Amino acid sequence: MKTTIRSCLLMILVGLAVTLLASVMGGMAAMGIGLELPHLPDGSTPAAPPLLLALLGALVLVAGMVPLAAGLALDKTQKAVALFLFLAWCYVGNTVMEAHLFSTLGGEVFTTVSQLFTATALAITLAALAPAAKSASPLGGQLKSLFASRAGGSWSWRLPVALLAFPVIYTFFGMIISPLVSDIYNQLGGYLHTPDMYIIQLGALSRSAVFMLVCLPTIACWQGSRRGLVLALGLGLWVAVGASALIAADFLPERMRLVHGLEIGADSFVHAWVLVKLLGKK
């Protein structure tokens, strides 16, 4: 128990340092090749939050990813790959897509390049420092075992339902919080906007497919209980999809950051429960 706690603390401390360094290096690399930064209407950039908020956001991201990294029954190399795929979509790709749909900040390529540095460095660090798996086996073999655990006919409805689940969850919680933030969208119409519902739904459906793909390695290779998997996957989704970024987004009003942060948390844990329930081993 003490060894596990020490390992997790070490993962958090080293992961935090690596994340901050990679974030700086990623930003410098993106600027070095002349990529356009995100920008507000007044010409300022939201890409450089205050140090304290950047530190807190990075800490939330790292700490939230530790349970996921510690629970995968994979060797260090394959664990790094699984974590990178998860972060590359949830922390980078999904964030960029969401910003593109709901804002006019621009700088999507800059954000992608800079945050990929962070995703890569964090995935490698957590995989290297995570406690050794009790019985690691190849990722491909565990994915085959997962699909072999249920009859083919079962997958024929489970996969489509899992695909459609995220748009439903996303829309449901979005409708709940909409009255709490709609006035802010109107006030900040210079760089925030709400697209047509069909665009939102198409975006949610396409993102759902990628979420399934990047979560499957975690579902297949989890070495703990189902409840532990739901909690770890939900927490990982929450911090990577939005919690860490919203903490550092000081250009947005506090009410919007809080409401959207709680919404993303609800989305993430419900989505994780649905994915584990539908796609987990029998």
Image (cartoon, rainbow, N blue to C red):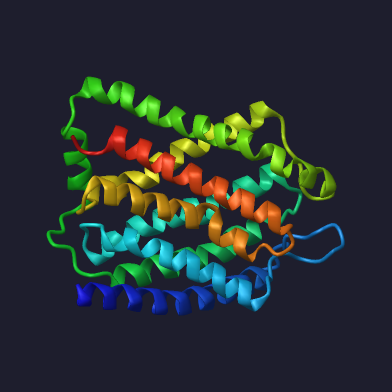
Q: Is residue 273 left or right of residue 239?
A: left
- Whether residue 246 is visible, yes or no, is yes
Q: Give the percent coordinates (x, y) of residue 224.
A: 21, 53
Residue located at (51% from left, 29% from top): 168
Q: Is residue 180 left or right of residue 241?
A: right
Q: Give the percent coordinates (x, y) of residue 53.
A: 62, 71
Residue located at (18% from left, 53% from top): 138
Q: Nearer the viewer, residue 240 or 83?
A: 240
Residue located at (65% from left, 26% from top): 198
Image vertical order of residue 165 relative to residue 241, above or below: above
Q: Nearer the viewer, residue 139 or 249?
A: 249
Q: Give the percent coordinates (x, y) of residue 42.
A: 87, 62
When asked about the image quadrant of residue 51, the answer is bottom right
Point out the image quarter for the C terminus: top left
Task: Count how many numbered circles sit on residues in the image.
Answer: 0
- Whether residue 217 is visible, yes or no, is no
Image vertical order of residue 165 relative to residue 217, above or below: above
| Residue furthest right in the image | 42
